[in-house]
């Protein structure tokens, strides 16, 4: 349970911070409404200010693929900081970072660094609109692409958790340029394009959905969307803010062999510092200023500390990938899903789950979970019980069922076994409510 110091810290925070937090999901509204406050982290563990230790599967919502405070990343940040924190002129670190991304991600030929996932997706659709001369974009119901106006239409993540699928403050004239279809439904996409294809600049898609829980693309779905967009002269944008360098070294596009025109990144490429990026075909990226007329800029874009952290992380990932690290992450995720489903079935509870690379999802639902409709039909009250009981056992999963779980390269056998043992103690408690 959340301790006294965290409770007090939250009360104090609420006097001066909106909802006590700087990002709505941190308020834990879906699971009781009081977050634990972090004191520090070490590897797969987060320690809260009450002195509780958690095996952490939130991992800052995805960035920490090397766990908390990895010594190499901390050292890279400290050494870089000692030389200056921002210059406003180019550094070689930015080029090195872009070289890594271009080398590892199959469709990306040129990159622009930004400071968050939201900036990346927002800039990518501006570019898509400029490149096509069209204004509509298509997103999937329950996918989350950050909080820019165009994306707060039937969005997932915290927007869905708060029951605010559409946000006040977004002009109707902007929202109506965002067309939505169910995830994993190629027929719906085909039909939308048949009706309005000549208005559509781009489809933006999470190639593995991570903001309605972790939902896998059906076989052939990504290929179908690729084919439809190409046929209609629209761009395909893969939002790999979560999946990039997480479902595999080359992201979802390498894993599924489907190449988008543009890709957005965040989270893992910054290793816990504020970073995003967008990139793609050279001819498209040439439209961005200063090469082209599409304006997009940032005082802290390509910040040296963020580049140093991200580069260190990506280089370590390259070495780890060669030794089968992503397969290990996925096998750990599968073990959690299997244990969750086995225990749920023993206690007569509905359950299903998915694991891919370093992402996983646990659902109290018979399944299959293929889109937002099926994801939101899961038993969220039961999940809240499960979350609280697991927390009391020292295991921190995502504080909402419609979010992904994140495995890191520093979770090991010991943590997986302890997590499964904790589940074995928790299931009889939640089943008997
Ligand atoms: N796209 C996806 C797929 C995301 O999951 C997120 C954040 N969870 C974003 C974009 C926005 O990134 P940020 O929070 O860094 O703005």
Image: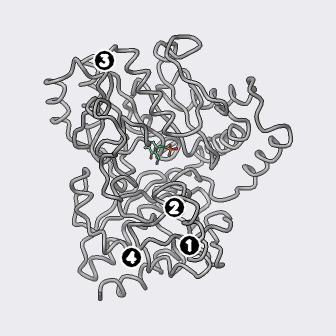
Using residue 37 as the reference point, say whether residue 106 is left or right of it.
left
State yes or no: discs 3 and 2 in contact (Cβ < 8 Å). no
Closer to the chain start, of discs 3 and 2, is 2
The residue labelled by disc 1 is: 11
Query: What secondary structure is marked by label 4?
Result: helix
| Marks 1, 2: nearer the viewer | 1
- What label does residue 134 carry, if any? 3
Q: How far apart are marks 3 and 1 (CA)?
A: 48 Å
The residue labelled by disc 4 is: 386
Of the pair 269 and 27, the residue shown nearer to us:
27
Closer to the chain start, of discs 4 and 2, is 2
Using residue 115 as the reference point, say whether residue 132 is left or right of it.
left
| Marks 3, 4: nearer the viewer | 3
Closer to the chain start, of discs 3 and 1, is 1
| Marks 1, 4: nearer the viewer | 1
State yes or no: discs 1 and 2 in contact (Cβ < 8 Å). no
State yes or no: discs 3 and 4 in contact (Cβ < 8 Å). no
Closer to the chain start, of discs 1 and 2, is 1
> In the figure, residue 163 lies in which quadrant?
bottom left
Q: Distance between the residues labelled 3 and 2?
A: 38 Å
The residue labelled by disc 2 is: 58
| Marks 3, 2: nearer the viewer | 3
Closer to the chain start, of discs 3 and 4, is 3
């Amino acid at each position: 349970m959340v301790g006294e110091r965290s409770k007090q810290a939250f009360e104090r925070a609420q006097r001066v911070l909106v909802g006590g937090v700087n990002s709505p999901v941190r308020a834990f509204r879906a699971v009781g409404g009081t977050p634990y406050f972090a004191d520090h982290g070490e590897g797969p563990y987060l320690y809260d200010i009450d002195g509780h230790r958690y095996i952490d599967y939130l991992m800052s919502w995805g960035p920490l693929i090397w766990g908390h405070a990895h010594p190499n990343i901390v050292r890279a940040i400290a050494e870089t900081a000692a030389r200056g924190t921002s210059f406003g002129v180019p550094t070689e670190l930015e080029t090195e970072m872009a070289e890594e991304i271009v080398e590892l991600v199959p469709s990306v030929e040129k990159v622009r660094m930004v400071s968050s996932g939201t900036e990346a997706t927002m800039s990518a659709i501006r570019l898509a609109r400029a490149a096509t001369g069209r204004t509509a974009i298509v997103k999937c119901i329950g996918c989350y692409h950050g909080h820019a106006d165009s994306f707060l239409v039937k969005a997932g993540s915290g927007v869905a958790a708060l029951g605010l699928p559409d946000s006040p403050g977004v002009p109707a004239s902007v929202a109506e340029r965002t067309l939505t279809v169910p995830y994993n439904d190629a027929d719906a996409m085909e039909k939308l394009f048949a009706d309005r294809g000549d208005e559509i600049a781009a489809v933006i898609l999470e190639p593995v959905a991570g903001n309605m829980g972790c939902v896998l693309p059906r076989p052939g779905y990504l290929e179908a969307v690729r084919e439809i967009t190409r046929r209609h002269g629209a761009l395909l944008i893969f939002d790999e803010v979560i999946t990039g360098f997480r479902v595999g070294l080359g992201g979802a596009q390498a894993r599924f062999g489907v190449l988008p025109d543009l890709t957005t990144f965040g989270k893992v490429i910054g290793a816990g510092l504020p970073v995003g990026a967008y990139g793609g075909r050279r001819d498209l990226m040439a439209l961005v200023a200063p090469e082209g007329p599409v304006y997009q800029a940032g005082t802290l874009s390509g910040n040296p500390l963020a580049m140093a952290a991200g580069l260190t992380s990506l280089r370590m990932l390259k070495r780890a990938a060669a030794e089968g690290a992503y397969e290990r992450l996925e096998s750990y995720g599968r073990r959690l899903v299997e244990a969750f489903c086995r225990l749920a079935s023993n206690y007569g509870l509905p359950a299903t789950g998915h694991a891919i690379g370093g992402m996983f999802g646990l659902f109290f639902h018979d399944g299959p979970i293929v889109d937002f409709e099926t994801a939101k039909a899961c038993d969220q009250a039961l999940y809240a019980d499960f979350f609280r009981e697991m927390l009391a056992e020292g295991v921190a999963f995502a504080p909402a069922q419609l979010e992904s779980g994140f495995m890191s390269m520093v979770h090991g056998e010991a943590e997986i076994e302890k997590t499964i043992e904790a589940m074995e103690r928790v299931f009889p408690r939640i089943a008997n409510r």
